[in-house]
Amino acid sequence: MIRFALSKLAGLLVVMLVVSFVTFAVFYLLPSDPAQMSCGRPCTPENLAIAREFMGFGKPWYLQYFDFLGGIFGGRTFGTGATAIHCGAPCFGYSFQQNAPVAELIVDRLPVTFSIAGGAAVAWLLLGVSTGVLSALKRGTLLDRAAMTGALAGVSAPTYLVGLLGILLFGFTLDAVPVHGYVPFAESPVDWAWHLVLPWLVLAFVHAAIYTRLTRGQMIETLGEDYIRTARAKGLGERAVVGKHALRNVLLPVVTLFGIDLGGLLGGAVITERVFGMPGLGALMMEAVGQLDLPLLLGCTLFSAFLIVAANAAVDLLYGFLDPRARLT
Amino acid sequence: MKESTVKRTVSVLAAIGLTVSLAACGANKKDTAAAPSKSAAKQGGTLYILPDAQKQSFDPAKSQGLAITSLALVHRRLTTWDVQEGKPTTVVPDLATDTGRASDGGKTWTFTLKANVKFSDGTPITSADVKHGVERSFAPAFSGGLGYHKTLLEGGPDFRGPFEGKNLSSVETPDPKTIVFRLSRPYGDWPWVASNPAFSPVPKGKGAEANYGENPAASGPYQVAKYQPGVEMRLKRNTHWSKETDKIRGGLPDEVVFQLGQQASVTSKRLIEDNGDDRFAFGASFVSPAQLAQIQGNPGAKSRLVTSKTGAVAYLAINTQRIKDPKVRQAFQYAVDKTTYQVATAGSPALAGDIATTLITQGINGRQQYDLYPAPPVGDPAKAKALLAEAGQAGGLDNLNLVVSTSNNFPEKAQAIQAALARANIKVTIKTLDGEAYTAATTGPNADYDLALSSWQPDFPSPNANLQPLFSSSEIGKGGYNISRYSNPEVDKLITEAQSTVDPNEAGKKWAAIDKLILQDSPVVPLIYTRNSFLRGSKVADFFIADFPAYPNYLKAGISQ
């Protein structure tokens, strides 16, 4: 177990390093200058040079990369004197557009994104797996066909479209849910949930579709296995056959997919947050892209990568519980 | 999972669905107003502003904001703009008693502060605070704002702000009410420059912190009450603001709330629906062409749509370093079809804006209407072909590339231009670039394009701000906006001369002459003066757009009772 954890940690560090390096390199391949956003107007070459120097963009990109890595362990200071900006270790960069250390900005946005992703994940997992199981058990019936048609719609529809249609129907036409904004859980748990119902349902609709199709396919295949026939021959009830023997096998690929999906979503539900006016990580990332905010973009990308790697590690652990053959020693 | 569990799960989900349906009773405060308010704004209430940006800052040094929008709710400047419908915008005193007194042939400008002007903590605003605000804008940590003053003030290019123990000696404060600016050359538009955000006072010695803009010392009618990035910026009254000293700001609502970070299309939909608090709101972003079309069929929303009479001049820039023959460039003036450009812009000529024939935009003092290349709105391809033939290009032009940004449906507009030019045998390939890449490609040192689509709204309403940034040779390839790479020593000389002219009327005549002179060389084809449309809620009153700028005046807007 310790060996497993260590190997996962090492893998995580390597992935982080590669992601940060690639993000840096890609950003510098673009024909644009992040200091331009802080240059002002008119942007004279002198003003641009001043902005570049202050922000640390005056050096070659590989030296900036080492500065970034150094900041994680020793912190960084930008500028001098009374206006100097200090970013304490571990410093994952400083956003000059947002006037705050990147890590602080990400931590501030976490509750919003985690609220969206957590609720949506529960909803899509319950909806997707249960519909998939029912479809498989009632194969060929009207219920199955309706569920598959719904799933096809969910798979095909972009989140953007579903979000806007959701707002139009439930927000404006039915006036059932708020169409924008976020209320912190600590302020009012009821309002928190009320503002999140629609984003949860939208994400659940889009994501559950894949789980429905996956669960259905796996369940049909599993129900045709010899060991299921054996279980039935032994006189086990249908509930035990499906719930205890078949579902366990079906859940293996579902858990894998769930880990990746949830990890990705925790890194920022970009479109959903934008459509619903939720100040989460995804919205922060969108702003970073729009404003050429390299430090923030890098921080968000690294954090997303971290979540995906961590989610995969969690899935590996969970595998052991679902399938004893894969248990870690 | 047992079958009973499956059933329970389905039941729970059904319950959620049912709850949502049953709760369909006013989640968005659907108490709708009947008709849009036509009455004047009254004192009191909460005004909501809906920008799509996720953050809001009131740092004057870092701002490029207009004198009539967000920043001016919190900060006053030495001078400001008097914007009225149907009249050219003029410069008027704000904190100062007048718009500045020139001496030394326009190289020295003196301002006197009004009596009884105070910060939000009750401290009197002195000339030292204005000087500190101006000096602060030179600090590398606070760059990013409008910086026309930085190269004009003596010693400005070498100054790095007041936080390193130095001061800018060309800004003098002989007494607490007087401030004197010494410039490196005569500059007639200094009163306009003094209306830029950096000329807002910052208490001397304060403002070193990076997030100063989140809760600055206010001099305008409002101060920050609460700020949540991505959620809202809430302003409350600055009780030390005196309406007696400020004729430009209404200061009517008790509170102003910026609801941050929602997508423009959803904001437009909220304003079309006009429910609850949205009745007291207006959108800070342009209404998109798609939403404009939708609003045309909705009389209620249409009556709340406010469209500017004019706006930024949209133009086709011709790279004069690659297309060197003026006669060939003049052919473009006739080849374009301005009507299809209007349709591509906003669906109809009426919503898009008037056809442009001059470089100085409407609503600016000194502008003279003229048309050097008279042609029907759809263009005159035959005349264009004739000019090309005269220039030895009877077969037309091949393989020209037209760069455009992906923003503001420029790709569709480029297609309209491409089709129009093809009628005159000018074959164009469109190259679409992301916003930043487009800026880098057009303002950088290497000009790998023949044509570019762009638009320009001056930073302040003077012909100077229209022409100098786009046509002075100093603005080529070093981050400046002379994207037609136009270089004419005579024009450069005349620009410097006009900038030095202190008398606005005399300067206006000079700028009008420069406007014509530039267009004779045809470095750009003016297309339209682009209109902007904004939506307001039914209870928002005194919400208007003057001739310049093509943005609503936030300072007079209020709530009707």
Image (spheres, coloured by chain):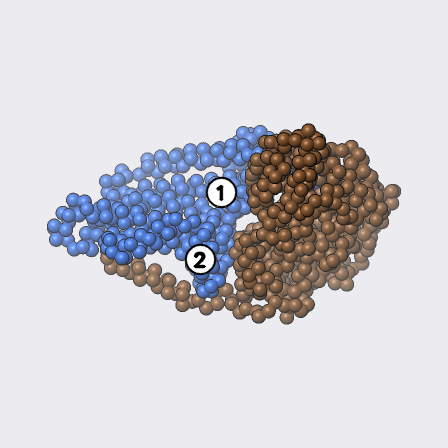
Q: For mark 2, does the 10 Å Cα neighbourhood hold few (<14), some (14 to 19), or many (20 or more) residues? A: some
The residue at the point 56 percent across, 59 percent down is B295
**Which SS class for mark 1?**
helix
Please report, as a chain letter, where disc 1 is located.
Answer: A
Indicate the secondary structure of the residue bearing disc 2: helix
Compared across the picture, whether B113 is left or right of A126 comes to right
Q: Are marks 2 and 1 on the same chain?
A: yes
Seen in the image, is A143 located left or right of residue A190?
A: left
- Determine the CA span between mark 2 and mark 1: 28 Å
Q: Chain in blue?
A: A
Would residue A120 appear left or right of B232 to someone viewing this image?
left
Front position among marks 2 and 1: 2
Which residue is disc 2 drawn over?
A: A166
Residue B166 locus on image (x, y percent): 75, 40
Q: Which is more toward the observer, B29 or A288?
A: B29
Q: In this view, does B396 lie above or below B361?
A: above
- Is residue B421 visible in this depiction of the protein? yes
Compared to residue A276, the image places residue A48 above or below, namely: above
- The residue lying furthest to the left in this view is A234
Residue for badge 1? A300
Q: In the figure, is residue B268 to the left or right of B308?
A: left
Query: In the image, what residue type sits under mark 2?
Result: Gly
Looking at the image, which residue is at 18% across and 55% down?
Answer: A238
**Residue B245, x across and y down, in percent:** 77, 60
> Quadrant of the image for the C terminus of chain B?
bottom right
For chain B, give the colour.
Answer: brown
- The residue lying toward the viewer, choosing from A203 and A196, is A203
